[in-house]
Image (cartoon, helix red, strand yellow):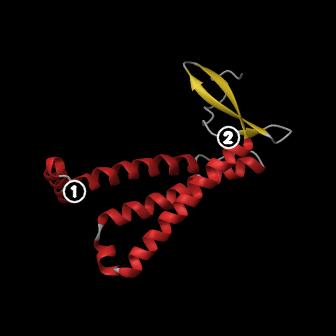
Amino acid sequence: YPNPRDRKFIPPFPCSVSNDSTTCQMYGFTGSWFTGITVRASQAIAVVVMILILTAIRILIEIIQFILNPISYITSFENYLEVAGHVLIVLFMIDPIYAFYCQSLPYDWPWQCGIFAVFLTWINFFVSMKRFPLIGIYILMYVDILFTFH
């Protein structure tokens, strides 16, 4: 395995495809050395396809919500978080799809999109917790303060 000091960190999803194109090499970072895990390319493709299908269903639901009640949809902050998260997930899936046919993209922006999608999902989860009476008042106060100091 390569020395981590010689090259930059390889993301933990398909980075290179073997010559027979039935397995792809995935690298994880453990301590100060790289460790390799071999998985079948068909399994990795199935995961990517499932993520894209579920994201497409969620985007379709968002479109239906917009068609049924556009004024309420536009005025809700949670909808902006959800749509941005879905778009970022699709952009994040460009790198694994490209890696199956070529090499991994030389850019870091798909991984930055993925990280930001996870961040937006947590923010959306946090904002949706306001429906529960025990912690809802604290979340409403936090959101009010957040918009006061923007």
Which numbered marker is on residue 46? none
Give the quarter of the image for residue 6.
Answer: top right
Q: Amino acid at mark 1?
A: Arg
Q: Which residue is mark 2?
A: 14
Is 96 positioned to the left or the right of 87 in the image?
Answer: right
Query: Where's residue 39, x and y in %?
Result: 70, 35
Please report the residue visible at 27 percent of the width from the left and 54 percent of the height from the top. 127
Q: Regarding mark 2 in the picture, which secondary structure is present there?
A: loop
- Which badge, 2 or 1, comes first in the chain's sequence? 2
Query: Where's residue 36, x and y in %?
Result: 68, 26
Please report the residue visible at 43 percent of the width from the left and 70 percent of the height from the top. 62
Residue 5's place in the image compared with 85, above or below, is above
Query: Where's residue 139, x and y in %?
Result: 19, 51
For the residues labelled 2 and 1, the Cα–Cα distance comes to 39 Å
Q: Amino acid at mark 2?
A: Pro
Which numbered marker is on residue 131? 1
